[in-house]
Amino acid sequence: MTRICCIFFVVAILGRLGAGQEPEPITDWTQHVIPDEERTFDFKTVAKGTVSVHRFVLKNPFLEPIHIKAILSSCTCTTIDFNTEGQSFLKTYEEAVIPIRLRGDMFEGQRNSTITVIIDEPYRAEIQLNIRGEIRTDLNISPRDSVDFGNVELGKEQSRALTVTYRGSNTQWRIVDVKCENEFIRTTDIITETTRVGEKTFRLNVILDDSAPHGNLSTTLLLISNDSESRREIPIPIRATVGTVINVTPKAFSLGILSPGEASPTKGVILRGSRPFRITKIECDNPAIEIPLTVNADDPPKIVYSLPVVYRNPTEGEGVPVEGVMRATVQVTTDIPGLTPSFHVTANVRE
């Protein structure tokens, strides 16, 4: 979202409120929160007994905060793992991740669900998210939810077994191909076993290559069967954390709209490591940003740190906003070589 569009959005809101009029919706402004092409997800084929998850991401590119009042599901076959009490306000550049679970452990057959996200600030709006998928009773997949390599050592190949059992009436049913767009994931040949009448088991190994780069890996393995077109693909989520990773939440955020000389509220930034680590130094390219966290060399390592961030908003000297906008980058040095997570901070200062 460009700065011009952001300003247009805020002026339209404040102008109408200042005139004492009821705000009128800006046509299609929620497209900037989540575009149409990201509002529908098809799980395709889901095995009975599994709980599959898709995460919708909402973003706030505007200067005004967005408030999520409620999230509703049209079908009990989907559950929403989102706390509107504690996660409902999105400031500028912040994101909300909404995990939707398709309950293959409790339902079966073709399932369609509409998730309604109700927004009441700065304008009232409703965003429709759509989930669909077929929960099949004739398939059993192990492991159930995903192939998760967990935290693996950098430069070390890993392998996980994957088993698909078919218990349907099609005696010719089989897996004919395996696809994955991620170059660091490959599979072994499929071994087919007929264990008893009406049941076939297909076994293969999913391999994480030793050349996989440092960081989080998330992709999908597609098993292709000789079934009908709508039931041909069986998606299997693949996850791994290669080496030690420190995730920063949020990576970019705004401290709000401030008057000249007004200090910002404190914003908490969470650093979460895949293993315990120490913070050895915190640096910022804007001296008016303060992070009142004391770190000592003899402190025990931790997996999670919460960094309080404040902008002092001076009216002169270093750190003064440029044309009403403050921008800063914070870099954190850790005791793990090569791991220096960073995050970006903005604030808007207006008379």
Image: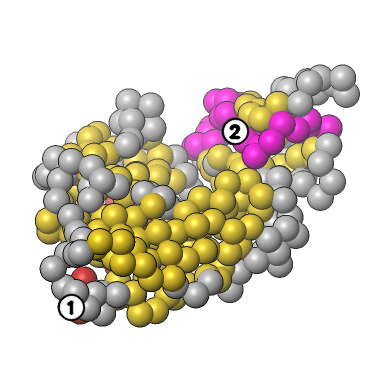
44 is within the stretch colored magenta: no
Q: Which residue is mark 2?
A: 270
Give 21 or 256, whichever is nearer the viewer: 256
Q: Residue at x 53, y 71 (%)?
A: 188
Disc 1 residue type?
A: Ser
Which secondary structure, mark 2? strand
Q: On the rendered image, what quadrant is the N terminus found in?
A: bottom left
Q: Secondary structure at mark 1?
A: loop
Q: Is residue 270 left or right of residue 302?
A: left
Q: Nearer the viewer, mark 1 or mark 2?
A: 1
- Image height check: is 196 above or below 81? below
Q: Which residues are magenta?
A: 255-283
Give left or right: position of 21 versus 194.
Answer: left
Labelled disc at residue 228 = 1
Give whichever of discs 1 and 2 has the lower sequence position.
Answer: 1
Q: CA distance from mark 1 to mark 2?
A: 47 Å
- The residue positioned 63% from the left and 46% from the top of the image is 151
